[in-house]
Image (cartoon, coloured by chain):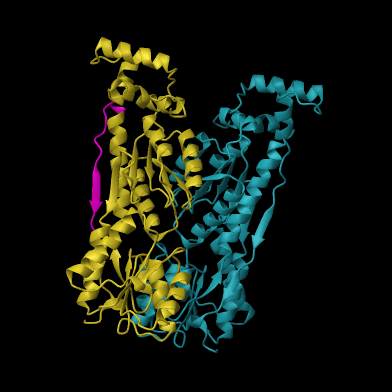
Chain colours: A yellow, B cyan
């Protein structure tokens, strides 16, 4: 038995009809058979269904607010995505309420419960590394508030989703390093959430494709993803007996720290070790040599996520059910000095 | 006649008593004379006073949410301040709802009206460049929701405030440049809001103090405050007949762009032109030469602002009136290679 209040979805599930049908039946809309209306009303009564006051209010009065749940607001990728979201919201006269979960599932539960009390018309979610249960997000949908997932995606939630082609990005970057003559390519990756798994697969497939051996001893996991960590890692890597001739780092800030750290250790970049990052930011052009990186369309992802959500809000207002979509955005390899062994 | 609903403050003003007295009188608390209670009730009836449902609700039920209104979320200074706010909120089990005004007064009005509908316990505000009327912020106070101003401060609002010693920061940086032998110091400043005026005054006083002439022809105003603008500005400055021997930029991102642009034009930094920025960030250590900057305690400002607000929330819960405070945080000059002419 599920906990929490009975929702439209519960009624819809038990009767095997859509949420829209239940909603329209309860409002005595035309186009629904009397038999269905009867069944819906009877079950609603039996289950002691009470409409969510917030969601109810939205039907008549539009708050023009959307919520955004994000692991880290001040992360180059997410900040660009949020800027994209805010641009679209601005264009449409919507306000954006932002909350940060700091990669903590517990905090995600708390912040979403706060948002559930706010008069939101829709929700954009990018979950934490820790999240594996999505009931707290599902509740918004149960209350008729549309949800769109971006970047951190799960199949456990039926919703529209916007993601980046992480596989292709990693494949292209690895291929580029191989073309530059690199054969001992180190990998610095984050925790193995699905999008990181996609990148690792792209990396492995590019190696295989070109007949370059995968060196498991050259895989490093980063945790804090900051410049300091890159500097420490550079020291570790340069102290290896057999140094790599290239490093592919999934976090651009780590890649910047690697460049700073390798230079300190007297390593020539890219001659001795080439460096490539994932996610391109202004910082990439500040270092010397400037950093080759996979540019993720983070701003466009934010825009697309907000556009999709606003569209679904409109559809729901018309008492229709939105058709969920999946958008995969392409990445781009920006070649700069840090990897150009063969100009 | 003021517009908007009648508030506790209106009643307090007309009777010449405190808001706390009005609040306690209406609730029939002990410790208030019958005469006062009578007068308050009579005026409340006459003015058709209705308690704000949100504020009312807060007296009994604590939402544990604070709101933050900020011109630009993704600005090195504000992002650090927001991180400080979020840290304190986390420690105290509070949630933070963030809105961005994008330096638009119109948007500030809209976003604050959204927040006024949310069950906030308190509000942290840093206003836009355009804001000169603060009635929309005052309304929170009228409803008994405490407000604390940070960084962008106005005397038009009675509240606690946390600011940085901008005058001293600019004075110290200018003094440092003069000590390095600089005599023709260019200034790149933003729009003349009070805190920028403070910095300009610090700059002028340091020049005067050391008998260095102020060169009005070497004052530049930046608008977008991004790297691109710094690069363009570098071209403009190097094309001058008489080049400056130092540039003091109030925006660190502009200073970074200046370093990149000056290098492109073949200028030696700091030998030909020294560069100093205001506000220190990780980016300062990424460029070569690394950037000398005034470090603003943005994170501490955020922490202090949140601590002050949470304290005032507690005081108000106990039906006392908080005593407003002003906290001025000191800056620190971080000397790096971009200004060290005399190591």
Check residue A56 for magenta coloring.
Answer: no
* Span of residues in magenta: A317-332
Check residue A329 for magenta coloring.
Answer: yes
Q: Nearer the viewer, residue A59 or B133?
A: A59
- A267 on left or right of B275: left
Residue A254 on image: x %, y %: 41, 69
> Which of the 4 quarters of the picture holds residue A80?
bottom left
Which residue is pictured at 38% across the width and 80% down the height?
B262
Task: Report how many numbered discs are placed on residues in the image.
Answer: 0
Residue A196 on image: x %, y %: 33, 58
Which residue is pictured at 22% across the width and 78% down the height?
A180
Q: Nearer the viewer, residue A185 or B24?
A: A185
- A145 on left or right of B82: left
Residue B325 on image: x %, y %: 69, 51
Q: Quadrant of the N terminus of chain B?
A: top right
Q: Is residue B184 visible?
A: no
What kind of secondary structure does the magenta stretch mostly adopt? loop
Q: Nearer the viewer, residue A250 or B33?
A: A250
Is the residue B32 above or below the residue A250 in the image? above
Q: Quadrant of the C terminus of chain B?
A: bottom right
Q: Nearer the viewer, residue B273 or A237?
A: A237
Q: Is residue B179 visible?
A: yes
Residue A36 on image: x %, y %: 28, 14
């Amino acid at each position: 038995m599920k906990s929490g209040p009975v929702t439209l979805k519960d009624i819809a599930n038990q009767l095997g009809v859509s949420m829209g049908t239940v909603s329209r039946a309860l409002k005595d809309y035309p186009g629904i058979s009397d038999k269905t209306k009867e069944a819906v009303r009877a079950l609603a009564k039996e289950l002691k269904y009470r409409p969510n006051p917030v969601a109810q209010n939205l039907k008549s009065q539009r708050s023009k607010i959307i919520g955004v749940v994000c692991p880290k607001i001040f992360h180059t990728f997410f900040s660009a995505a949020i800027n994209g979201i805010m641009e679209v919201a601005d264009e449409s006269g919507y306000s954006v309420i932002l909350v940060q979960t700091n990669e903590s599932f517990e905090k995600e539960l708390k912040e979403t419960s706060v948002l559930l009390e706010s008069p939101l018309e829709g929700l954009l979610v990018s979950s934490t590394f820790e999240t594996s249960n999505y009931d707290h997000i599902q509740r918004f949908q149960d209350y008729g508030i549309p949800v769109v997932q971006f970047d951190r995606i799960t199949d456990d939630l039926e919703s529209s989703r916007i993601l980046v082609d992480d596989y292709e990005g990693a494949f292209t970057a690895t291929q580029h390093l191989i073309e530059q003559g690199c054969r001992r390519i180190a990998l610095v990756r984050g925790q193995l959430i699905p999008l990181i798994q996609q990148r690792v697969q792209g990396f492995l497939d590019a190696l295989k494709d070109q007949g370059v051996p995968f060196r498991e001893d050259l895989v490093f996991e980063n945790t804090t993803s900051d410049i300091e960590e890159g500097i420490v890692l550079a020291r570790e890597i340069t102290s290896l007996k057999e140094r790599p001739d290239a490093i592919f780092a999934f976090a651009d800030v780590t890649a910047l720290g690697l460049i700073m750290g390798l230079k300190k250790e007297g390593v020539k970049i890219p001659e001795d070790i080439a460096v490539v990052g994932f996610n391109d930011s202004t910082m990439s052009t500040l270092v010397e040599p400037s950093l080759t990186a996979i540019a993720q369309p983070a701003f466009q992802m934010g825009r697309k996520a907000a556009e999709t959500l606003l569209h679904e809000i409109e559809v729901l207002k018309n008492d229709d059910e939105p058709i969920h979509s999946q958008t995969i955005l392409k990445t781009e390899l920006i070649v700069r000095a840090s990897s150009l062994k063969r100009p």
